[in-house]
Each structure stands twice: as structure tokens, then as C-alpha cells.
Image (cartoon, rainbow, N blue to C red):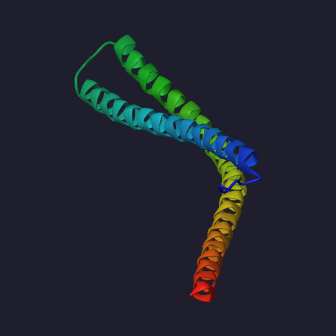
């Protein structure tokens, strides 16, 4: 008779839930990376805008062009502010999702450990039973002789 874990279905469900929560956590982390990269791009764009404005200040340019340069810098700053807010929200989501994932992981880990303990006990008992049968055969043959 082979080993059957009575909670195998529950274990599969827990594994599925853990994988789902891990995927959700990964999606949030990917979004965080995307936002951070975009913030870095905006930082470089802001540096370029400041350099362009400084060069323009050294030359005589129309006020409208200078105003456009200032507007571009302000637009970049507004985008950065918006992305920083989004990053804060994502960090909160990541923290909450991490808690959910860790709970799912603990639940699955508990059942996996239970499976391993029961499987080990089953295998030990099988070895004992097999050894007892061999001992009984040996004793029976010895009495016959």
C-alpha cells in the first residue's frame, strides 16, 4: 500500500494560493522598478533642462523661449512629484502584499512539514513491518529445520 496524505488537496490549494500571492507581489515589485526607472529618466531630463536653461541665459534669447524652457522644467518636476506619490502608494501595496504572501507561505510550509513528517513515519513503519515479516519467515524456516 502506498502513502496517501489525507490533506493533499488542501496542500495543493495552499501551494496555489502561495503562488498567486507571490505573482501579485512580483507584479507590484516590477511596477516599483518601472516607476524608479522613470524617476531616474526624469532626473536626467531635469538635469538636461537646467543645463539648456543655463546655456540659454548666457545668450540673448526671446522671453517666450525662456518661458518654454521653464515650463518644460516645471512639467518634469510635476511628473516627478506624481511618480514619487505613486511610488509611495506602491511601497505600501508591496508591504501589504508581502504580509499576505508570508502568511500564505507559512500556511503552505506548515502543511508541507506535516506531509514530510507523516511520510517519514509511514516509511519507518513500512520498514518495521517488512523487517518483522522477514524475521517471521526466518524463525519459521528455523523451526522447520
Quadrant (top left/top right/bottom left/bottom right) for the N terminus: bottom right
Looking at the picture, tell me which residue is in the foreground, 111 or 63.
Answer: 111
What x and y, as percent, mark residue 110? 71, 61
Residue drawn at x 77%, y 53% is: 6
What x and y, as percent, mark residue 141? 58, 82
Q: Residue furthest front?
A: 145
What x and y, as percent, mark residue 2? 65, 55
Whether 25 is drawn above or below 102: the answer is above
Residue drawn at x 71%, y 63% is: 114
Q: Quadrant of residue 60?
A: top left
Whether 105 is drawn above or below 66: the answer is below
What x and y, as percent, mark residue 88? 62, 43
Q: How many numbered discs, if any?
A: 0
As drawn, is 139 to the left or to the right of 79? Answer: right
Q: Quadrant of residue 116?
A: bottom right
Whether 110 is drawn above or below 36: the answer is below
Looking at the picture, tell me which residue is in the foreground, 60 or 39.
Answer: 39
Looking at the picture, tell me which residue is in the foreground, 100 or 62.
Answer: 100
Residue drawn at x 71%, y 47% is: 14
Quadrant (top left/top right/bottom left/bottom right) for the C terminus: bottom right
Residue drawn at x 61%, y 72% is: 130
Amino acid at each position: 500500500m502506498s502513502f496517501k496524505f489525507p490533506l493533499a488537496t488542501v496542500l495543493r490549494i495552499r501551494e496555489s494560493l502561495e503562488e498567486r500571492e507571490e505573482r501579485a507581489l512580483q507584479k507590484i515589485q516590477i511596477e516599483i522598478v518601472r516607476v524608479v526607472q522613470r524617476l531616474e529618466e526624469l532626473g536626467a531630463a531635469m538635469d538636461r533642462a537646467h543645463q539648456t536653461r543655463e546655456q540659454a541665459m548666457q545668450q540673448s534669447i526671446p522671453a517666450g523661449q525662456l518661458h518654454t524652457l521653464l515650463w518644460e522644467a516645471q512639467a518634469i518636476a510635476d511628473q516627478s512629484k506624481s511618480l514619487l506619490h505613486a511610488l509611495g502608494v506602491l511601497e505600501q501595496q508591496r508591504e501589504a502584499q508581502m504580509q499576505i504572501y508570508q502568511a500564505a507561505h507559512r500556511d503552505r510550509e506548515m502543511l508541507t512539514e506535516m506531509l514530510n513528517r507523516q511520510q517519514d513515519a509511514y516509511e519507518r513503519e513500512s520498514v518495521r513491518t517488512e523487517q518483522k515479516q522477514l524475521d517471521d519467515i526466518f524463525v519459521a524456516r528455523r523451526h522447520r529445520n
